[in-house]
Structure formats: structure tokens, C-alpha cells
Amino acid sequence: MDRSELIKRLIDEGSEIVYSDDLEPTKITLSSDLGKLYNNYLKWRQDGLTLLNLLGLIDLANAFNSLDTLNSPHFPNTKDRIKVFVNGLRGLQILFIAELRASLLAVTLDTNCVIEYADRKDVENFECIETIILSSATNRISLRVTNAAKVDIAQDKKSKRMERTLRFLARIPEIRVADQSINQKDYNSVEERVKSILFPRSDFNNMSPNKKMDIEHLTVHCWAKRDLFVTSDSDFLKKRTEINSNLDTDIVTTEECVEEILAL
């Protein structure tokens, strides 16, 4: 299921809640199961927040998180019914915006691209990354880094370069994957597939920190169902045919990414 389909499913679930007969004042009865309806609203609110964070739509996730809950619901109290109805409508509006954004080409920058951009040593590569960033600023694409990028960069022993890179990194939204907000079994399945392709003969427990970070970056990218993973890392590039065919994503260089954007 792609990004847009996941959001459409949430829109359908929200519509069932908002337009339920149990919230219609003329149809409500004492037998209406409003407690169940409110529990469905709470679950829908949490699922929406989790998905929007996962897709890197942080501003929309924050807006969704502002949807009201009831301290002590008193269904069929009219005021509480109206509150759930109005907040449900707000949530649907947020998801409609998310659906539009999810249709954009979803690009993830690998950490090495972030460092190379901050270094500005390779002019051609810098210009490619600059084009990618400007394309995001003009809403031609959706640009993100993984939530492991900050940890990865913090390992840089060159403190000045690390500080410069972190300042640039702060400009790009993260894909947020928290342990409590994912289906751990499914996430682990993606991680195992990534590991088996990148480092098939390596024991994870004995891997170098860099290899573990590579696995995490690509796993988060694939888990978030994004389109292009932009990198100059040979570990990814030499395996990209296998990655592209088995993980439903595309590993590309910065130049190739620009070509994809220009073709939109």
C-alpha cells in the first residue's frame, strides 16, 4: 500500500466516524453506542498522528495532534458530540492536505549527501543537492532525512564540520519512526530484508557502527514508503539493482535525482 492509499484509508475511517448516525442529533438514541464511537475516534486520531509523522509531514502531524479529546466524555451530551464532530472534520481537512502532499515525489537524502553539501568541496555535487533542496522549497518534491541522520553526523570527529552539517540538517524535516508507534514485526521484516541485501555475510551484533547506520537509514526510508534514496555511498550503489527490485524503492545519485526532478 503506497502513501496516498494509506492516507485515503484514514480518510475513509474518519468519514465513518464524523458522518456516523451516532453523531446525528436527530438520530441519536439512548441505545447508541457512543462510547465505542469515541474509542474509534481516539484510535483514528493516534493512527493519523503516527502516519503523518512517519511520512515526514511534521507540520500536519502537529496540527493533527492538536485535535481535542474529552477529559470525561458524557455521551450523549450534545456538547461532547459536537466537539467530536468538529474535531473529526478538522482531522479530515488535514488528511486531505496530506493526501495532496503524498502525491509528490518523495526523496530521502542519505547522510553523506548532507555532509557533502555542507562541505561544498565537490562543486557539481553541491549544485545537484542545491537543486534538490530548491525543488523541495518550491513544493516540486517532498525532501526528508531519516531520524538517524543526526546520530550519524554526531559521530563526525571533525567538530567544525559536524556543527556546520548539523545546522544544515536542521533545515530538512525528519522521517520519524518511534518504537511505540510502529508495527515492530513489520518493521523488523523490512530491516531483515535490507540487512540481507547490504551485508549478507555480516553478523549484525559484530557490525561496525557505519554499517548499522546504513541499515537503519535504508530501513526507515523503505518503511516510510518513499521513492528515491539519494546517496554517494558505494555500499548502496553497488547493490542498487538488487535493492531496487526487492525493496520497492530506487537508489540514485544526486545527478540522477536531479534528472528525475527535471522529468516531472
Image (tube, rainbow, N blue to C red):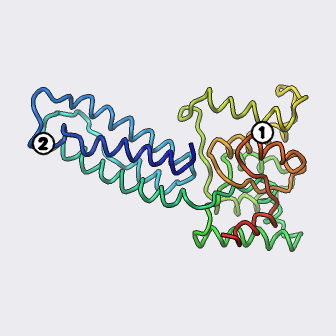
- Locate residue 13: give its quadrant: top left
What residue type is disc 2 on?
Answer: Thr
The one of 227 and 127 positioned closer to us in this rendering: 227
Spatial CA distance of label 2 from label 1 is 51 Å
Q: In this orientation, does residue 161 appear?
A: no
Question: In this picture, is 9 found above or below 258?
Answer: above
Circle 1: element type = helix
Q: How many marks?
A: 2
Question: In this picture, is 197 found above or below 175?
Answer: above
The residue that mark 1 highlights is: 215
The residue that mark 2 highlights is: 78
Name the residue located 62 percent from the left edge and 30 percent from the top edge.
Answer: 186
Percent across and percent down for residue 142 are: 61, 61
Percent across and percent down for residue 246 are: 76, 40
Name the residue located 19 percent from the left edge and 39 percent from the top edge.
Answer: 21
Percent across and percent down for residue 46 are: 43, 39
User: Which label's residue is closer to the chain start, 2 or 1?
Assistant: 2
- Locate residue 114: give its quadrant: bottom right
The one of 87 and 172 positioned closer to us in this rendering: 87
Quadrant that contains the N terminus: top right
**Mark 1: few, some, or many residues within 10 Å (few <14, many ≥20)?**
many
Q: Residue furthest front?
A: 245
The one of 36 and 263 positioned closer to us in this rendering: 263
Q: Image check: 143 left or right of 259?
A: left
Image disc number at residue 168 = none
Circle 2: element type = helix
Name the residue located 47 percent from the left edge and 56 percent from the top edge.
Answer: 98
**Mark 2: few, some, or many residues within 10 Å (few <14, many ≥20)?**
few
Quadrant that contains the C terminus: bottom right
What residue type is disc 1 on?
Answer: Ile
